[in-house]
Image (tube, helix red, strand yellow):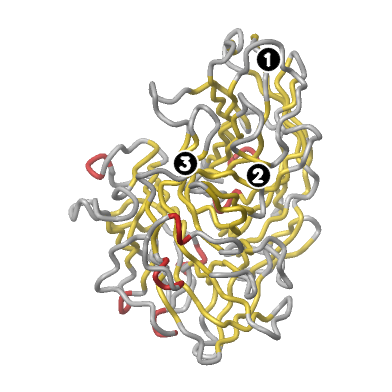
Amino acid sequence: MSDRRVRAFVLLLVAAGVLAGCGGSGTHFGGGQANTVPVTVSMTDTPPAGVSVLSFQVTITDARLNPWNVELLAAPVTPVTVDLARLQTESSLLSAVNVAPGTYTSLALTIAPNPSLTFQNNGAPLTVGGVLCATGAICKAGLTTANDSQSVSFPGAGITLAGSTPAALLIDANLSDLLSNAANTISMDLSVNGALAASQIAPAQGAPFEALEDVVGVVSAPANGAFMLQTALAKYNITTNSSTKFLNFSSGGCGSASFTCITASQIVSVNMSLQSNNTLIATDIFFEDNSTALPEIEGVVVATGGLPAQFSMVVLQETPAASGPAVVGSQVTVALNATPFAVDNLVGNTTGFSFASTADMIVGQEVSVQQGAGSTASVIQASRVLLRSSRITGTVAITATSPNFTMNGLPPFLQNASPATTQIVFETSTTFTPNGTEFGGTAANDSQIFVGRSISVRGQLFANSGNPKLLATRVVQNN
């Protein structure tokens, strides 16, 4: 297996006084009890060679700081499920708690048995959770876990958290150790040496803790510049300010591009910033739908052989949550009956690119399908198909066209598709929403992208008449 890493960011705001064991606000983020900060998880790369991981759902059931046994998941403890495969380029909030000041030496994690793994097997036949996956097949199974709990020590004497001072902790999971492929059987073991590491990090002075992007959910209680957003993971209390941008609302019948366009039961996508005082401020709000009458099923396209009548995708998320009947992580057929196509305006500058019909579809695109009447767990009757942002990890091949660059070493499910995608041109720009292409990892800008490096990119992927191009809103160089 190649050396791949998942990074989980645990963010805490330490309250003054002894608050260990005090209740947090469940899965209700922002505007809750004072002196709490959500926990975030982000993924910066993908698992082993020969396997295209499409969905990797892990449920965290317990997370504690020791030696004082401080629970990081809100009390009463609520298990939180995250799709690590989706988090190659962004973060996801998990929980909000109060923590007592003091010195902590380790962090203990517990996950639920049988994490759900959906993958395409591009090597020899594999067994996952007792399920045999043939070469070339897309399979979904529960991973066998040798150990579901593990305590990870902080460096040196530990970390010291001061009263009323925000603190951030980093959990670094090395997937080359965490996931094992022994005798063509994939399993997971938290206790393997090197699989997990923990340390303390801190934002720059006065900077937000974390930027959280493309959070899709349902609006409720909009008033006085704030609203609640319900996602599959949690309920967020989000505030807007004079800098917040409102995009795509004209397609929903509102032309003012202001908070007056926000109404209850809308489906929106939000980019937001987690402040050190535990408030969430929206930087960008993208209109998706006026109501939840027709759920939005988001997935990654894995086969286009049935076009123009249908295509196949793996379900990544549903809005509203569990609106079904499709199951997250499952492969479904999307039936097209004079279905309109459109580009979700997540970039702001797609001039010259098209996603107007089935002729513009390729494997690897992430799309949002509006679920129509008659849909089943295996066949979604599409009322509309929107192009959204793909998350792709590969290797930098060409930088001579900087600020654009070309990437190969793509996931096998792209290379083995029909038609095959062996390289993608990634376009970066200062004009992309919200503030131009963002860079992370070991690259602060396009001049620091180097040939041969592993890189994860988020953006809308266009077929571009057989020359695939991705408009990159975020680029993370992994080494």
Amino acid on which disc 1 is placed? Ala
> In the rendering, at what x and y percent does residue 479 appear?
40, 37
- Residue with the mark numbered 3: 281
> In the rendering, at what x and y percent does residue 295 appear?
63, 71
Residues marked 2 and 1 touching at CB (< 8 Å):
no
- Distance from disc 3 to disc 1, alpha carbons, whole Å, reads 26 Å
- Dot 3 or dot 1: first in sequence order is 1
Amino acid on which disc 3 is placed? Ile
Along the line of sight, which residue is nearer the eye, 424 or 216?
Answer: 216
The answer to whether 14 is drawn above or below residue 322 in the figure is above
The residue shown at (52%, 27%) is 277
> In the rendering, at what x and y percent does residue 143 appear?
75, 51
* Dot 2 alpha-carbon crowd within 10 angstroms: few under 14, some 14 to 19, many 20 or more: many
Amino acid on which disc 2 is placed? Leu
Q: Nearer the viewer, mark 3 or mark 1?
A: 3
- Residue with the mark numbered 2: 179
Residues marked 3 and 2 touching at CB (< 8 Å):
no
- Residue with the mark numbered 1: 100
